[in-house]
Image (tube, rainbow, N blue to C red):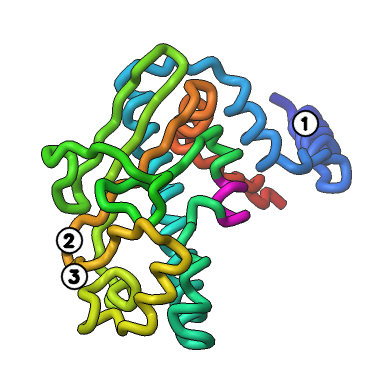
Amino acid sequence: MSKQLVFLFLALAATACRPDQVEHLKDTKRIGVETANWEVKRIMPQDLLRATRWAGDTLTAFADTLLRRRLARGLAAGGVAASLPLCRPETYAATDSMARILQATPRRVSARPRNSAHLAALPASEMQPDTLRVVKRPSQEVFVYQRPIVLNNRLCLRCHGEVGKDVSQADYALIQKAYPQDRATGYQLGQVMGAWQVRLTRPGVAEFWTMKTRKKWKEHKMPKLF
């Protein structure tokens, strides 16, 4: 190749690759996420059951965290009288917001409830320590999650412990006035008090599986060539 052709080739290459003539893609991270959402994914039945457990754990752990925080503030501010109305984490607005995202309906039940509306027959085989989860699919479109509620916070003894020892007589009078059929006292640390039960729909479970298993998009910047 002649020197003239070599110089011409180098000149054209330099002109074609000038930085001011390179058009960079913008918002590549968003594009990558949206592209992942468009991918058709096959979700197997066992995947949906696994996602049901993930969703149930996420929702109930979130609600329990809110409950502990509010009870601590309520007891510190006004004792049992102030905290008694707070012991309904399934009704919190923040819990409801998460439940709507998951298309789930949570509730708390017990064989010895404070509120008789929460009475439920719970087999002893399903009321083991907190590591136990029960996940079922009663129909094609419905999934059910359940896990035990364990009294593992001493704050809860103020309302659910032994009357005369953990629960003062004055506080127990307040509890009986609000809940005349109360059966939720006499517990000790580590005992199972009841269960979280969450009903979920198939679309909600499938969407949660997709979100949990989606590949994390990493933006790869163009190397600096010049």
How far apart are the two marked residues, 2 and 1, measured between alpha carbons? Answer: 81 Å
Q: Nearer the viewer, residue 163 or 128?
A: 163
As drawn, 187 above or below 28: below
Q: Decide whether the magenta segment is chiefly helix, strand or loop.
A: helix
Quadrant (top left, top right, bottom left, bottom right) of the N terminus: top right
Mark 3 residue element: loop
User: Whole-percent x and y of residue 171?
Assistant: 38, 80
Amino acid type, residue under disc 1 in the picture: Phe
Q: What residue do we see at 26% from left, 66% from top?
A: 185
Range shown magenta: 92-98
Please report contact status of discs 3 and 1: CB closer than 8 Å, yes or no: no
Please report contact status of discs 2 and 1: CB closer than 8 Å, yes or no: no
Crowding at mark 3 (Cα within 10 Å: few <14, some 14-19, many 20+): some
Please report contact status of discs 2 and 3: CB closer than 8 Å, yes or no: yes
Q: Mark 3 or mark 1: which comes first in sequence? A: 1
Mark 2 residue element: loop
User: Whole-percent x and y of residue 43?
Assistant: 41, 18
Q: Nearer the viewer, residue 58 or 189?
A: 189
Residue receiving disc 1: 9
State whether residue 195 appears in this view.
yes
Q: Which of 134 and 35 is in front in this view?
A: 134
Residue 174: in magenta span:
no
Crowding at mark 1 (Cα within 10 Å: few <14, some 14-19, many 20+): few
Amino acid type, residue under disc 2 in the picture: Gln
- Left or right? Give the position of 222 relative to 163: right
How far apart are the two marked residues, 2 and 3, measured between alpha carbons? Answer: 6 Å
Give the image quarter of residue 6.
top right
Q: What residue do we see at 56% from left, 19% from top?
A: 39
Q: What residue do we see at 18% from left, 70% from top?
A: 189
Residue receiving disc 2: 191
As drawn, 25 above or below 78: above
Residue receiving disc 3: 189
